[in-house]
Image (cartoon, helix red, strand yellow):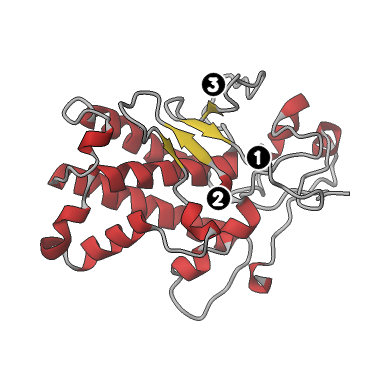
């Protein structure tokens, strides 16, 4: 039967196999779907812009993955702060409560509802074999995220762990932020420009991410009872609603 109403801040495949066909993506513009979504997209666009400037100095290639610098450190910290902000927004807006500060153990619950570990991100310009990234794959295998561990190490001991402010960790983190935004908002950037979401698929199975730079392969491993089943006409109906997912049961 599928899910008849969307969950807050949750993008999912529909039972017809698409993510956006026939205007069904418009549920993301329901005022109850997300609180100020543009305030999460805009910082990502700035990070993406700064990454492209960094590419003027560090060639995007396998050989440079171990490079580290204060500039990379700054971008890595900013990116992981945005990752935490998005994770907190997903949990809190869905009604999740905790008697302690939210951490990665809480954030990992999102993998269950958004299939983060199934997303794949491609960098358009890259020399070598590391062009494709699955930044949350560690959660699929029960492991931690190395790039996030690097961020935590840098927070607590920058002097001793400075080598972890590497180009490779930065790329993984920004791809992780790309996944988180895609898993909430698909390709919608919430600007006032005309949007032609996903009119056609691409031959490699990947689509443009928010901001137009990265390429994303969206998951196709949703079970029938996880997929959305509503239609565009349902979205127009006055009784259409957005529901909360009960993360306390994970």
Asked if residue 214 lies left or right of residue 68, the reply is right
Asked if residue 164 lies left or right of residue 202, the reply is left
- Closer to the camera, 146 or 75? 146
Between marks 2 and 1 in the image, the one whose residue lies nearer the viewer? 2
- Closer to the camera, 235 or 90? 90
Disc 1 element: helix
Nearer the N terminus, badge 2 or badge 1? 1
Disc 2 element: helix
Instruction: Using a 10 Å C-alpha cutoff, classify the residue at mark 3 as few (fewer than 14 neighbours), some (14 to 19) or many (20 or more).
Output: few
- Closer to the camera, 166 or 179? 166
- Closer to the camera, 164 or 190? 164
Nearer the N terminus, badge 1 or badge 3? 1
State the CA–CA distance, disc 1 to disc 3.
15 Å
Between marks 2 and 3 in the image, the one whose residue lies nearer the viewer? 2
**Which residue is tagged 3?**
193
Rendered residue at 49%/57% (across/down): 87
Residue 205 in the image: x percent, y percent? 60, 27
Residue 242 in the image: x percent, y percent? 73, 51
Rendered residue at 81%/45% (across/down): 240
Between marks 1 and 3 in the image, the one whose residue lies nearer the viewer? 1
Asked if the residues shown at circle 2 and circle 3 are in contact, with their CB atoms under 8 angstroms apart, the answer is no
Rendered position, 28 above or below 157: above
Asked if residue 193 lies left or right of residue 80, the reply is right
Instruction: Using a 10 Å C-alpha cutoff, classify the residue at mark 1 as few (fewer than 14 neighbours), some (14 to 19) or many (20 or more).
Output: many
**Which residue is tagged 2?**
116
Rendered residue at 51%/81% (across/down): 99
Residue 71 in the image: x percent, y percent? 17, 42
Q: How many marks?
A: 3
Rendered residue at 26%/44% (across/down): 75
Instruction: Using a 10 Å C-alpha cutoff, classify the residue at mark 2 as few (fewer than 14 neighbours), some (14 to 19) or many (20 or more).
Output: many
**Which residue is tagged 1?**
28
């Amino acid at each position: 039967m599928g899910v008849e109403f969307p969950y807050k801040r949750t993008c999912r495949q529909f039972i017809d196999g698409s993510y956006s066909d026939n205007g069904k993506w418009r549920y993301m513009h329901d005022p109850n779907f997300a609180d100020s979504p543009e305030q999460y997209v805009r910082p990502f666009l700035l990070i993406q812009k700064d990454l492209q400037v960094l590419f003027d100095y560090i060639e995007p290639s396998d050989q440079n993955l171990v490079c580290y610098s204060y500039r990379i450190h700054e971008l890595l910290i900013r990116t992981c702060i945005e990752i935490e902000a998005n994770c907190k927004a997903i949990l809190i807006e869905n009604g999740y409560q905790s008697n302690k500060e939210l951490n990665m153990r809480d954030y990992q619950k999102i993998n269950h509802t958004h299939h983060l570990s199934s997303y794949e991100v491609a960098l358009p310009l890259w020399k070598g074999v590391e062009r494709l990234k699955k930044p949350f794959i560690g959660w699929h295998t029960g492991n931690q995220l190395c790039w996030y561990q690097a961020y935590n190490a840098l927070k607590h001991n920058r002097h001793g762990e400075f080598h972890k402010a590497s180009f490779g960790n930065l790329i993984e983190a920004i791809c992780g932020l790309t996944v988180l935004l895609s898993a909430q908002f698909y390709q919608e950037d919430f600007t006032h420009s005309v949007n032609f979401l996903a009119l056609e698929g691409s031959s490699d199975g990947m689509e443009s991410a928010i901001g137009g730079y990265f390429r994303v392969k969206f998951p196709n491993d949703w079970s029938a009872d996880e997929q959305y089943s509503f239609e565009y006409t349902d979205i127009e109906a006055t009784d259409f609603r957005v529901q909360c997912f009960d993360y306390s049961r994970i």
